[in-house]
Structures are given as C-alpha cells and as structure tokens.
Image (cartoon, rainbow, N blue to C red):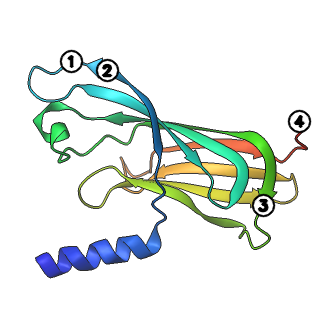
Amino acid sequence: MKKITTFLALLSSLTTVNIHAEEVDCVTTSWKLIGSNHKVCVQAYDDPKVKGVSCYMSQAKKGGLKGTFGLAEDPAQFSLDCRQIGEIIIDSKLPEQEVAFSEDTSLFFKETRVMRVFDKKRNTLIYLAISRKLIDGAPANSISTVPIMPWSK
C-alpha cells in the first residue's frame, strides 16, 4: 500500500503545478463544538508564467475533527476571479492551454485545478477552475477572464 501511495504522489507531482497560495483570510460559516469551524477561505495566486495577473479563489473548507487534522474531504465549492494588477508580460513560450496552478482538497485523489487558456483572437487570458473529482457526472467549475490591456502607471 505504501508503494502505491508513494507512486501516486510522485505521479501527481509530475502532472500538476502546486504553487504556494497566499491565504488572504477565512470566514466562519458554521461553528463546530469539537474541532475547527467550517469556513470559506480566500487565497491569492500570482500566475507564475504571466506577470501582472493575480487570481483570487474562495473555497469551502470542512471543519470538525477531520478538518482539524487535515483528513476531511473539502466540498467542490469554489469561486475564481482573476485580474490584471500590472503590466502583463507573457512568456513567449506560453502554450494555448496549461495548468496554471492546483491545490489538493482531500488527502487522496481530489484537487482544484486552474487551467489557463490563451484566446489569441480576442487577446484574452481565460482561467478555468475545475474540481478533479466528478460531482454528479460533471465537475464543479468557475471561470474568469483577463483581457490583455495596456497598463498605465
């Protein structure tokens, strides 16, 4: 079992981009008598390949004893908003579609992944957050767009 877990962890690290998110704040949504409270947390991500773009994601986090010890499976409930925060500088080798960042939302087999899609025709970056675990046959998702505009100081 340990070998399988190690293999899956290695495979996951090769296929996803785990970028350190900056936790902005959390809001309690339900008080728990034992363990941490249920909450919604807001995290900020700076796009590692596109300078001048930051994304904010709010995501539900389970509390209780399992949540306190990191064993709870967080629900696939999130929202994404990305904005231009400065001059946009794009790596010349930016693919049309790739994982911009991801975050594990359970101990095993569930993550929230943010894909970056470049719409050349409209000169717009599209960020699509999806849950990597199917919920009722379709993944939970959220979208945000950033038109590439000149930035004046």
**Amino acid residing under circle 2:** Thr
Check contact, mark 2 vs mark 3: CB within 8 A.
no
Cα distance between the residues tagged 3 and 1? 44 Å
Tag in front: 4 or 3: 4
Mark 3 sits on what residue? 90
Chain-order first, disc 2 or disc 3: 2
N-terminal-most mark, 1 or 4: 1
Residue 88 drawn at (x, y percent)? 80, 51
What's the residue type where badge 4 is placed? Lys
Q: Position of residue 62 (x, y in %)?
A: 25, 35
Residue bearing mark 4:
153
Residue at far front of view = 153
Amino acid type, label 1: Trp
Residue 121 located left or right of residue 27: right
Label 1: state its secondary structure.
Answer: loop
Quadrant of image for the N terminus: bottom left
**Which mark lies nearer to you, 3 or 1?**
3
Q: Residue 118 occupies which quadrant of the picture? A: bottom right
Quarter occupied by residue 96:
bottom right
| Residue occupied by mark 1 | 31
On screen, residue 111 versus residue 82, left or right, reads left
Q: In this view, does 53 lie to the left or right of 34?
A: right
Q: For residue 85, what is the image quadrant?
A: top right
Q: Do the residues labelled 1 and 2 touch (CB within 8 Å)?
A: yes
Instruction: Give the CA separation, mark 4 to mark 2.
Output: 38 Å
Relative depth, front residue between 108 and 18: 18
Q: Pointer 2: what residue? A: 28
Question: Which amino acid is tagged 3?
Answer: Ile
Where residue 115 sits in the image (x, y, percent)?
Answer: 58, 57
Q: Which of the two discs, 3 and 1, labels the residue nearer the N terminus?
A: 1
Image position, residue 151 (x, y; %): 88, 41
